[in-house]
Amino acid sequence: ATKHASYDPLKAATWKPGERVPFLFLAQALDAISNESGRLAMTELLCNVFRTVIATSPGDLLPVVYLVANKVAPAHEGVELGIGEATLVKALAEATGRKEAQIKIDMKKAGDLGIVAQASRTTQRTMFPSAALTCGKVLDEFRFIAKESGTASQDKKRARIKALLVAARECEPLYLMRQLGGKMRIGLAEQTVISALGQAVVLSEDPPVPPKDLPARLDEAGKIMKKVYSECPSFDEIVPALLEVGVKRLPEVCHFKLGVPVKPMLAKPTKGVTEVLDKFQDRLFTCEYKYDGERAQVHGFEDGSIFVYSRSAENVTERYPDIRDSIAKYVKPETKSFVIDCEAVAYDRVKDKILPFQVLSTRARKQVQTADIKVQLCLYAFDLLYLNGEALIEEQLRERREKLFGAFEEVKGEFQFAKTITSRELEEMQQFLNDAVDHSCEGLIVKTLTEEATYEPSQRSNHWLKLKKDYMDTVGDTIDLVPIGAFYGGGKRAGVYGAYLLACHDEENDEYQAISKIGTGFSDVMLTERFNALKDHVIDAPKPYYQVDETFAKKVDVWFEPHEVWEVKAADLSISPHYRAAAGVVDPSKGISVRFPRFIRLREDKKPESATSSEQIAEMYRSQKINHVGQAGDEDD
Ligand code: ATP
């Protein structure tokens, strides 16, 4: 990448006010950012990018923000980039007249298709040189490419990618390629984008904020932006509102609303009832069954229509026509509009019992027709976030729950409230946990009721503690990991992969860190299924953002793009010379590995970036009673 040691976006505007912002301006700024490693310096550069756009062509702030965040639409619209490597290689070959095989060789050397694209001169002959790319144009093309489906969609996508590449100059191809692949790799966390945006708006105020007030105003802007984005994760809503009313008044305009799903509140693992009692001390709390199904955030509108959103805020309404058809039965007449947080669980209505998650996962996921549904659902509601035009997330759980009970009607086996007790007796809680497990639940979630008991979107909160019976003596919870490589199987496993290399996700550096090899817990069917699902995601070399010990990496037979997430149960975590998870965090140089991992299931509701983070791994390691120090040559090999 080009070095921009003293690059200043504020001085880099080459276009006239009101003109569309050139993509080259952004690509160069991203390049400058990629040369910084400190969060502060990155934020400042990015803030100046946004300030420049606000000062010249504010109408382009939205496309610029989208491109910086490497997104094309809010999560709930389900439109995403992440074009496979094979398509990108083909498009690059067409744009440059080079052979695919040669591009692949170069990619193996450079480790990054973006770098290969930047180095390849386009030989595409055009009658007229292509017009310079603008941010608006690039985003429009990205959206088209992301949305295109149906017949010949691959060809259409490739043609668009090729045209972009032909028009690209200087460092533009690098960022086009990386963005199309869905991974920008400059270490820019979403939080940095959000706070830089807030700061830029404060610094663009007219009249300017007096210098003495600036530090406090910038600090406040960061907090407001974070909160607003967690309640209303949509740049479409936030950016125009920011330009209109500024940061301070932003929460009046952008807050939690019907139709824009919040990222769900999550729980922290604990290892037993005593730990819960220790953590909550004299607080008032409640225990609820932790149902084992799929999270469903149901938004109900006044006209009776409903939308269902998944754990990752995807619109999954088409998966649940049965909820759509029956919801009216459970909604009381005075309840006009609502958002409930629920778990959708497979349910046997003849025997009146909850069925295990495995049964739920046999339900079709796309374009489901009510008549074809064989596995019935029960929706267990545990929270109410919105009622009749009013957001409730700032209210305490006790109030929210009262309103939930008042607004809906239970129908056994179809719609029920999560089972709960409010007790601080150790034995009673222990008994309740056993009951939960007997009723096919994973355990309990224990929640504060009256103080610090608001709904915290997208937070893994200390105010929700999960207690899973099976894992209490081990690490407290299962772990969700990404298969990044595999080893060929022998004997009974010939023809499929015999074992896999797993990684956790490091949020700070946006990389995948190897944590364990796994070969147990799979049935023959599962092995075949995973083989078939992953074979389309094989790549020639490990991604540059994979952290794998070098000698160990040589033993890996195939590498994959980050594609799926697996729930894994482990005996414990140990310090390991072979693995890189949370390296440097609990040991100055070694990483953490999970020992004796068993495959539990595929987590279809999680994206690779939401796999267990290295921070969580370090936290779990620290909370283990006995910390093992792994020896070189233990079961890692
Ligand atoms: P992770 O594995 O990242 O921790 P997860 O999806 O397994 O995420 P947990 O934090 O383990 O989530 O637990 C929260 C999940 O448990 C919720 O996302 C929800 O789907 C489910 N759940 C079941 N019953 C409840 C309940 N009573 N209250 C809250 N969540 C519940």
Image (cartoon, rainbow, N blue to C red):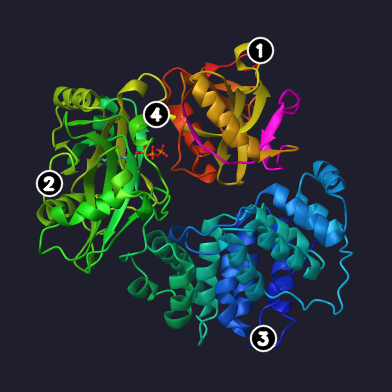
Residue ID at (48%, 73%) = 239
Q: Give the residue type that dot 2 points to.
A: Glu
Q: CA distance from mark 2 to mark 3?
A: 57 Å
Q: Check mark 4 vs ligand 1: CB closer than 8 Å? yes or no.
A: yes
Q: Give the residue type that dot 3 points to.
A: Glu
Q: Is residue 616 above or below residue 116?
A: above
Q: Position of residue 450 (x, y in %)?
A: 18, 49
The residue segment tinted magenta is 542-568
> Helix, strand or loop at disc 2?
loop
Q: Is residue 413 above or below residue 629?
A: below
Q: Assign the C terminus to one quadrant of the image.
A: top right
Which tag, 4 or 3, sits closer to the chain's start? 3
Mark 1 crowd level (few <14, some 14–19, many ≥20, 10 Å Cα): few
Q: Which residue is mark 4?
A: 477
Q: CA distance from mark 1 to mark 4?
A: 26 Å
Q: Is residue 202 visible?
A: yes
> Helix, strand or loop at disc 3?
loop
Which tag, 1 or 3, sits closer to the chain's start? 3
Q: Which residue is mark 1?
A: 633
The numbered mark at residue 19 is: 3
